[in-house]
């Protein structure tokens, strides 16, 4: 018991220290976990900890992650991805296996071993890629979605790979079928057609359980009103599915993903996700730590040429294949590089495939050790590839997009800076009323798209004085600042209010503090980007609570009047050189106004409701 507590404390302490430091320096949490594992590896060795056994347990974090991914992916969306799954995902697997197997043949391996190596190294790390893309907010980008499709297809492809590996056995009869994932395979000794029926029955059982069993079970558990029981049921559901998939020789991760997809439209989806997410995060972290701790530096030092060669081969070959597929699939520019760099590593399923290949006499233990090191090394390098994308590729692409600003050949009394979600609506409203505007935007792709709809806009940085001069700002009546970035908004407002006192400036504010900031710069017409939408939602809330439409609007107007009046009083105390939370006069004024206005506002609201009832 004491040894277990020491081990748990050691791992948690390594997480707490390494991961925040890695994230702070922009390295990402995955690299932090890997570094933590490397740091505690000598201690684990001294304690005689079975790192491989820990890794087998920690791989359950991958299962949970795929379950949560499935919860977020509705069946309709999965069907919509079918072309990308088969085309992009299938193409990556086939080409990567072919290229890597060809390289293995060139260095002297038999064709059976070469094919096995190709299959093992073709799969990428679902855990690392999805985790990192999510952290960086890139999972929903074009490159992120393409990467996700490939990872899903790879998880499916592991099943036929496990079926093919025994056929590549050399040096005698194949050993008795052992568990493909470290468990008991109940269909291993059955004829092929019976095994297929059993496998289909298991998949059908998962679908039916998700469709008809989960809801009644959760309703029953809800009667106990104990949150920990929801967590227990969620974990039991995922573990049970994984166990069932293992019994029929399928990937537990694939089964968990399928169950998540089935439950994607369930009313218990968010409950399941919130209950399982903490366990998923900790187990994934443990998995990455075991990968880092499993790197045998003695073997690396002895065979470093082979290790570096195969690591370079895997990454270079897969990047080349992925870039070619990205080009064929129309994934352009930096998204193509994101797609290629994110999937260049070998994945966690490689550990399963390697163990299965050794048990079936496809690979020797010596070659398996070398492959294990290379899988771990490529996974370790992956966060560095993401840094390469952030620091080099993305910036290079941005520089490529830079071009000279358009020559503005027209002069209108209205200038709109930015034609995104806000500026676009304003431009359409003004145009509908017959007011011509000069629109300036810095997104060249967006401008080109707008041209197809007959919308004219000029490319350029609207904060540049020379560009504003060519647009006729000195003679303009109105400047509408609808840029997305707060810094750009501040820069333009500061320049316009300081140099053109007769120009009416309407500025978009990101939040309440930004309103004060722009007011201090001299702007007197400021619109919070979410304010009107929030007022409309508040009015709808009043109506939903039984207030009629007219009185709900009156209550909303009363709140808006109080809010606008108090904001002006507070804005006069705002200072550009002092943060709001350190501005004592401003804080005191806010407290004073709340103490004065909140009771009055409540009284006004009650009066409106009372008058409505009388009517």
Image (cartoon, rainbow, N blue to C red):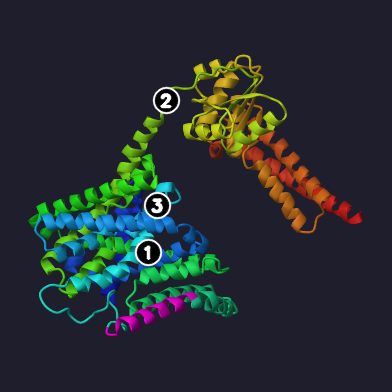
Residue 196 within the segment the image draws in magenta: yes
Say which residue label 2 marks: 403
Secondary structure type for disc 3: helix
Is residue 173 toward the left or the right of residue 79 in the image? left
Rendered-image quadrant of the N terminus: bottom left
Q: Position of residue 236 (x, y in %)?
A: 44, 77
In percent of width and height, residue 130 lies at 38, 56
Dot 1 surroundings within 10 Å: few (below 14), some, or many (20 or more)?
some
Residue 77 falls within the magenta-colored stretch: no
Dividing the picture into quarters, in which one does residue 438 lie? top right
Question: Is residue 6 visible to the viewer in this orientation of the structure?
Answer: no
Instruction: Check disc 1 and report its element: helix, strand or loop.
Output: helix
Looking at the rendered structure, the secondary structure element under dot 2 is loop
Q: Earlier in the sequence, mark 1 or mark 2?
A: 1
Q: Residues within 10 Å of mark 3 (few under 14, many from 20)?
A: many
**Spatial separation of the CA atoms under disc 1 and disc 3:** 27 Å
Residue interval drawn in magenta: 189-207
| Sequence-earlier tag: 1 or 3 | 3
Which residue matches tag 3?
Answer: 146
Mark 1, residue position: 282
Instruction: Tell me which numbered mark, 3 or 2, is placed earlier along the sequence.
Output: 3
Mark 1 against mark 3, which lies toward the viewer?
A: 3
Nearer to us: label 1 or label 2? 2
């Amino acid at each position: 018991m004491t040894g277990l507590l020491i081990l748990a404390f050691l791992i948690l302490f390594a997480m707490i220290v390494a991961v925040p430091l890695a994230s702070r320096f922009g390295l990402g949490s995955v690299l932090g976990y890997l570094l933590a594992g490397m740091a505690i590896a000598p201690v684990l060795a001294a304690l005689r900890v079975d790192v491989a056994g820990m890794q087998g347990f920690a791989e359950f974090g991958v299962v949970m992650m795929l379950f949560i991914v499935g919860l977020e992916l509705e069946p309709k969306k999965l069907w919509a991805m079918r072309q990308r799954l088969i085309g992009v995902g299938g193409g990556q697997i086939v080409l990567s296996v072919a290229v890597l197997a060809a390289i293995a043949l060139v260095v002297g391996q038999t064709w059976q071993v070469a094919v096995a190596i190709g299959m093992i190294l073709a799969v990428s790390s679902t855990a690392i890629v999805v985790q990192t893309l999510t952290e960086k907010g890139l999972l929903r980008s074009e490159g992120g979605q393409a990467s996700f499709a490939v990872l899903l297809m790879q998880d499916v492809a592991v099943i036929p790979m496990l079926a093919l590996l025994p056929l590549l056995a050399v040096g005698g009869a194949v050993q008795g079928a052992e568990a493909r994932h470290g468990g008991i395979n109940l269909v291993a000794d059955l004829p092929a057609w019976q095994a297929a029926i059993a496998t289909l029955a298991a998949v059908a059982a998962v679908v039916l359980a998700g469709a008809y069993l989960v809801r009644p079970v959760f309703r029953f558990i809800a009667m106990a009103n104990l949150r920990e029981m929801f967590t227990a049921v969620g974990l039991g559901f995922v573990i049970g599915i994984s166990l069932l998939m293992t019994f029929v020789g399928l990937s537990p991760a694939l089964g968990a993903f399928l169950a998540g997809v089935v439950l994607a439209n369930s009313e218990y989806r968010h409950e399941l996700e919130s209950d399982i997410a903490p366990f998923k995060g900790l187990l994934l972290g443990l998995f990455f730590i075991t990968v880092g701790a499993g790197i045998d530096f003695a073997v690396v030092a002895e065979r470093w040429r082979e290790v570096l060669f195969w690591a370079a081969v895997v990454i270079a070959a897969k990047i080349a294949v992925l870039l070619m597929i990205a080009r064929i699939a129309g994934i352009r520019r930096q998204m193509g590089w994101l797609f290629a760099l994110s999937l260049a590593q070998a994945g966690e399923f490689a550990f399963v495939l390697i163990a299965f290949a050794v048990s079936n006499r496809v690979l020797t233990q010596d070659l398996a050790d070398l492959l294990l090191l290379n899988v771990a090394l490529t996974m370790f390098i992956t966060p560095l590839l993401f840094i390469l994308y952030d620091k080099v590729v993305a910036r290079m692409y941005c520089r490529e997009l830079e071009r000279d600003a358009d020559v503005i050949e027209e002069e209108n009394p209205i200038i709109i800076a930015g034609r995104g979600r806000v500026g676009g609506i304003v431009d359409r409203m003004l145009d509908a009323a017959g007011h011509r505007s000069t629109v300036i935007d810095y997104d060249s792709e967006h401008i080109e798209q707008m041209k197809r709809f007959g919308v004219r806009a000029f490319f350029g940085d609207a904060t540049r004085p020379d560009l504003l001069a060519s647009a006729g700002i000195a003679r303009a009546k109105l400047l509408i600042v609808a840029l997305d970035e707060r810094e750009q908004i501040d820069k333009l407002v500061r320049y316009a209010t300081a140099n053109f006192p007769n120009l009416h400036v309407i500025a978009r504010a990101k939040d309440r503090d930004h309103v004060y900031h722009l007011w201090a710069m001299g702007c007197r017409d400021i619109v919070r980007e979410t304010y009107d939408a929030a007022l409309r939602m508040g009015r709808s809330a009043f109506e939903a609570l039984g207030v009629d439409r007219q009185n709900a609007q009156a209550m909303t107007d009363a709140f808006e009047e109080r809010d606008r009046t108090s904001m002006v009083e507070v804005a006069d105390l705002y200072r550009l050189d002092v943060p709001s939370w350190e501005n004592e006069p401003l804080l005191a004024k806010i407290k004073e106004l709340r103490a004065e206005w909140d009771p009055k506002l409540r009284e006004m609201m009650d009066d409106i409701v009372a008058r409505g009832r009388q009517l």
